[in-house]
């Protein structure tokens, strides 16, 4: 019974009005890396995506990403597609919109070549967090950290990035 009360209290605390929260589209660029077995290669990410707010505090997202490894040893582009769940925290400003996210990512053609794996598709889990800052009523900036993990077979690869982009609704 006490767990139910705690769950109810947390739900009421985080279930308040989210003034800046809105469905939106975004584009970003991101420096980052691919880390495997203690080695990290430099990577540049670029992507387009969107998020639909489905309930106060909760959103569903879809994005496409192109990854370009720029360090020595492997050169090429590969695409990734992600679906995500978002949770937006209660806030008291109408410009700042902090969030966390978790989801599934499919990476294609060479996405795990640097880990000595086959060059086909890779199934990844992703998580991250950041904020949208709405400097105009329909235009904002997105700042986010995102990490994509490949938890199965062989060395576990992390595809991580620090994203900065524009968001529109």
Image (cartoon, rainbow, N blue to C red):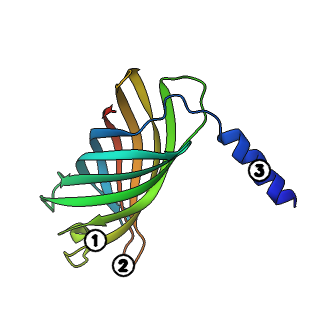
**Callout 2: 10 Å neighbours few (<14), some, many (20+)?**
few
> Of residues 100 and 14, which is closer to you in this image?
14
Q: For the residues marked 3 and 2, what is the alpha-carbon distance in whole angstroms?
A: 42 Å
Residue 1 falls in image quadrant = bottom right
Instruction: Report which quarter residue 119 is drawn in.
Output: bottom left
Please state which of the two labelled residues, at mark 3 or mark 2, is closer to the viewer.
Answer: 3
x%, y% of residue 93? 55, 22
Q: Position of residue 47 (x, y in %)?
A: 24, 47
Q: Is residue 1 above or below residue 99?
A: below
Residue 80 is left or right of residue 3, and the answer is left
Front one among 75 and 66: 66
Question: Disc 2 vs disc 1: Cβ atoms closer than 8 Å?
Answer: yes
Q: Is label 3 in a helix, a strand or a loop?
A: helix
Q: Earlier in the sequence, mark 3 or mark 1?
A: 3
- Whole-angstrom CA distance, mark 2 to mark 1, is 8 Å
Categorize mark 3 by other alpha carbons within 10 Å: few (<14), some (14-19), many (20+). few
Mark 1: secondary structure: helix
Mark count: 3
- Residue placed furthest toward the left: 76
Q: Are marks 3 and 2 in contact (CB under 8 Å)?
A: no
* Residue labelled with disc 2: 154
**Image-based side of 140 in relation to 69, left or right:** right
Mark drawn on residue 115: 1
* Sooner in the amino-acid sequence: mark 3 or mark 2: 3
**Circle nearer the N terminus (2, 1):** 1
């Amino acid at each position: 019974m006490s767990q139910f009360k705690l769950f109810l209290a947390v739900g009421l605390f985080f279930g308040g009005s989210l003034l800046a929260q809105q469905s939106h589209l975004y584009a970003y660029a991101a420096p980052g890396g691919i880390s495997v077995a203690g080695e990290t290669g430099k990577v540049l990410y670029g992507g387009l995506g969107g998020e639909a707010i489905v309930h106060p505090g909760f959103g569903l997202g879809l994005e496409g990403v192109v990854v370009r490894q720029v360090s020595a040893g492997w050169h090429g582009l590969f695409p990734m597609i992600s679906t995500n769940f978002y949770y937006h925290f209660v806030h008291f400003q109408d410009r700042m919109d902090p969030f966390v996210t978790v989801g599934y990512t499919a990476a294609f053609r060479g996405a795990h070549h640097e880990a000595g794996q086959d060059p086909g598709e890779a199934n990844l889990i992703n998580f991250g967090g950041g904020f949208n800052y709405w400097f105009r009523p329909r235009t904002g900036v997105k700042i986010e950290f995102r990490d994509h993990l490949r938890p199965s077979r062989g060395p576990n690869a992390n595809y991580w990035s620090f994203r900065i982009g524009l968001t529109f609704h």
